């Protein structure tokens, strides 16, 4: 976990130019696993936005959140939390549009319209 950007540990691996070394495959996999476990807990508790509902999240999914935050860089945690909300909103919008389209098609069919 030494690659985490908020870490001030002097053992954090550095590149020859002094910059940080990107996380390796194993570190990324641990991060994604932590994210998936955290999101599963959110789903189980019907929580979409873990940023706005932070107190509730910490109460119901505190262990999973701690593991997620411990396995991922802060920027990744923020990105994944925001992406979850964006994808939820996108899916709800697509669902709404499909329902509206189905209603319009049904209305047109009732007026005698037939698709080509």
Image: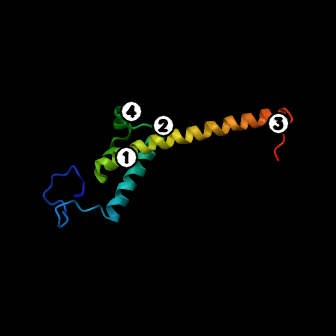
Res 53 label: 4
Query: Label 2, on which residue?
Result: 46
Q: Are marks 3 and 1 in contact (CB under 8 Å)?
A: no
**First in sequence: mark 2 vs mark 4:** 2
Q: Give me the C-alpha separation between circle 3 and circle 4.
A: 44 Å
Can you tell which mark lies on residue 79? 1
Most distant residue in the left direction: 10
> Which class describes the residues within 10 Å of circle 4: few (<14), some (14-19), or many (20+)?
few
- Residue 42: x percent and y percent? 44, 41
Indicate which disc, 4 or 1, sits on the residue closer to the N terminus. 4
Q: Nearer the viewer, residue 38 or 114?
A: 114
Q: Picture coordinates of residue 6 (x, y %)?
A: 21, 49
Between marks 3 and 1 in the image, the one whose residue lies nearer the viewer: 3
Q: Residue furthest right?
A: 112
Image position of 27 with respect to 63: above or below? below
Do tag 3 and tag 4 residues touch (Cβ < 8 Å)? no
Q: Which residue is mark 3?
A: 109
Of pointers 3 and 4, the one earlier in the residue sequence? 4
């Amino acid at each position: 976990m030494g690659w985490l950007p908020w870490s001030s540990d002097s053992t954090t691996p550095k590149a020859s130019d002094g910059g940080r070394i990107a996380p390796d495959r194993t570190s990324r996999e641990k991060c994604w696993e932590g994210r998936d476990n955290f999101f599963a807990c959110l789903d189980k508790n019907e929580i979409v936005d873990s940023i706005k509902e932070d107190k509730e999240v910490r109460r119901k999914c505190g262990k999973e959140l701690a593991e997620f935050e411990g396995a991922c860089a802060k920027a990744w945690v923020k990105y994944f939390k925001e992406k979850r909300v964006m994808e939820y909103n996108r899916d709800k919008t697509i669902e709404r549009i499909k329902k509206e389209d189905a209603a319009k098609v049904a209305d047109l069919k009732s007026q005698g319209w037939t698709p080509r």
